[in-house]
Image (spheres, rainbow, N blue to C red):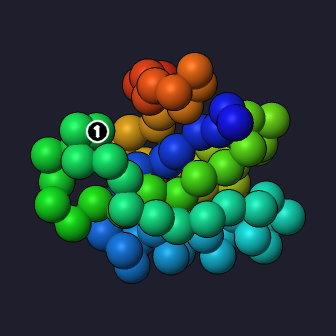
Amino acid sequence: MEHYIILARSVTYAQRMQKSLGRAGIRCYIFRPPRDLTDMGCAYAVRIAISDLPEAKAVLQRDGLNPVQIFIYQNGLYQEVGL
């Protein structure tokens, strides 16, 4: 299943993102990203649906929550996309 993951610098930051997105009606889940996506040991990620990325980016920007990186998962692989 295709989806986006938004990397956060800590679990607390990921929780803030989750709350912000939830208030906007965007369903998301927090999890630890695969180790090969980040060199930050404490990184967490928020997973969202493909269709929610434009709105999610706007919501996070409005709330001052800047992602570290954004990846798309498709065909069994992660690929970085622009912030």
Q: Which residue: 14% across, 46% down?
A: 39
Question: Residue 57, percent across and down?
Answer: 63, 43
Q: Which residue: 21% across, 66% down?
A: 42
Q: Which residue: 67% across, 32% down?
A: 2
Q: In this view, does 19 lie above or below 24?
A: below
In this picture, residue 19 sits left or right of residue 72: right
Between 83 and 72, the one lying in front of the other is: 72
Q: Is residue 57 above or below residue 63?
A: above
Q: Can residue 77 be seen in this view?
A: yes
Q: Which residue: 77% across, 62% down?
A: 27
Between 77 and 47, the one lying in front of the other is: 77
Question: Residue 65, percent across and down?
Answer: 49, 59
Between 64 and 73, the one lying in front of the other is: 73
Q: Among all residues in the image, which is located at the extreme front? A: 76
Q: Is residue 83 visible?
A: no
Helix, strand or loop for disc 1: helix
In this picture, residue 69 sits left or right of residue 56: left
Between 37 and 7, the one lying in front of the other is: 37
Q: Mark 1 points at which residue?
A: 37
